Image (tube, rainbow, N blue to C red):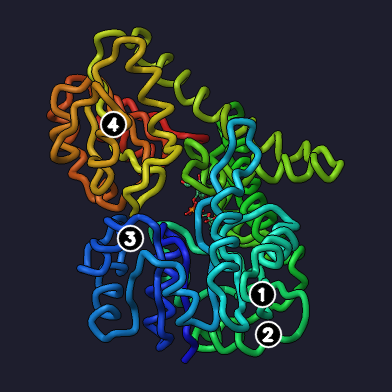
Amino acid sequence: MVKISIVGTGYVGLVTGACFAEVGHQVICVDNDLKKVETLQAGGIPIYEPGLEEMVKRNVANGRLRFTGKIADGVNNSEVIFIAVPTPPKPNGDVDMSFVERVAREIAGAMMEYKIVVDKSTVPVKTGEKVGATIKRYNKHKVDFDVISNPEFLREGCAVQDLMQPDRVVIGVGGPRPVAKMKEVYTPFNAPIIVTDINSAELIKHACNSFLALKISYTNALSVICEASGANISDVVHGMGLDKRIGRAFLNAGLGYGGSCFPKDLSAFVHIAEALGYEFRLLKEVQQINADQIQLFLKKVHDTLWIVKDKTIGVLGLAFKPNTDDMRLAPSLEVIRPLQKEGAKIRAYDPKAMEKAREVLPGVEFCDDAYAVATGADALIICTEWDEFRQLDLEKLRSVMNQPIVLDGRNLYDPQKMTELGFVYKSIGR
Ligand code: UGA
């Protein structure tokens, strides 16, 4: 058992804290939002993530997980302190590191004996050096410490599973002293543990997210060629994905990547490279292809409907991906807003994200289910591939629509079947 504290109870901090407690560690989650601390301690979960609520409740009840607003409480009751605060983008795409810096100072002021300080937030390469220098400067009681980089690879929607069964754990260290303790933290997860220098560990994170985004944009670029040539992107990626060197994951064509990670991390990585004297043109193109994907889809809407003004358009799926209620940089926003601007009447449904969507999509009429969205609609647009949309009674759906037009941004249905059912059906690259 390792005594752990985690500063920041956002997505990464909360799921990490719960999973550490689940495998038997003693965990304190620290947050300066006292209302959030109170809610969490009482078993309330501010985000939707499958399996998380039960896990938090279970571990609060068995005493292995607790929440506090006081950083000194966390620091002085743990051996290893994780920093898991946001690193949001600045308007120029650079990374705002002020939360990490502030937490490093606060930890430094509270430490009374040797501590291992671990950065879990996604940060630019060389942050470990800066965090180390900051802690040294504000080290009130002049105690020993080590700084470590331990990037997180969890995906929203399957975060608990990703954390409990990781493909690998990356630990970037400046020397051998903290390695044994970090291995003790991660041994219960039965995953390969890679020990590197700090800069390499930090780079691995940006390198992974950028590579995954590259796979998506590559597929989306291929989908354009498929449409132009009459080929089918689903068959093409099936044929590609069986090559073990390529793999099938992240080869789904669609409206492109969104969310709080890929768009931000690609911009950050382009900036980091620039600061190091390298123009990362490849990643700039990945970003451009991603942006183009929305424009191509909107063109498809116009080509099909001709005039959008005064049409009732139903939207199925709002979250940036299935199994989450996260609306941050969701492609649905970029599809809906221009159509609203042109005078379309938008109706929408999402299984989990409607509450958050209401805050960012004024003027949209939110419905109770997919059939209510379709009723009287001149077209249906699919923005998120929720499983429940795969189970819809398509005949019923068609019968309630004003016009049987489906524009599918996530390739949910079989084009031939949709045509047989009487739909005008357009998807991506097929
Ligand atoms: C991503 C990474 O997958 C995680 O490993 C990483 O830890 C996380 O960012 C992070 O940096 O914190 P996440 O953004 O939660 O995770 O979600 P993904 O499943 O990676 O999906 C990202 C976007 O790509 C979504 O908009 C999704 O719809 C899109 N996508 C994904 C595609 O368009 N096609 C695909 O084939 C796969």
Residue at the spot of label 4: 315
- Would you say the residues marked 3 and 4 are in contact, meaning their CB atoms lie under 8 Å apart? no
- Would you say the residues marked 2 and 1 are in contact, meaning their CB atoms lie under 8 Å apart? yes
Residue at the spot of label 1: 171
Distance between the alpha carbons at the discs numbered 1 and 4: 43 Å
Query: Helix, strand, or loop for circle 4?
Result: strand
Tell me the kind of residue under disc 4: Val
Distance between the alpha carbons at the discs numbered 4 and 2: 50 Å
Which mark, residue 179? Answer: 2
Residue at the spot of label 3: 49
Instruction: Give me the residue at 18% from left, 32% from top.
Output: 366
- The earlier-in-sequence mark between 4 and 2 is 2
Q: Toward the viewer: 231 or 48?
A: 48
From the viewer's perspective, is 49 left or right of 270?
A: left
From the viewer's perspective, is the residue at label 3 or at label 1 nearer? 1
User: Which quadrant would residue 56 be assigned to in this image?
Assistant: bottom left
Tell me the kind of residue under disc 2: Val
- The earlier-in-sequence mark between 3 and 4 is 3
Query: Helix, strand, or loop for circle 1?
Result: strand
- The earlier-in-sequence mark between 1 and 4 is 1
Q: Tell me, yes or no, if residue 204 can be seen here.
A: no
Which residue is outermost to the front? Answer: 141
Q: Residues within 10 Å of mark 1 (few under 14, many from 20)?
A: many
- The earlier-in-sequence mark between 2 and 3 is 3
Q: Tell me, yes or no, if residue 124 can be seen here.
A: yes
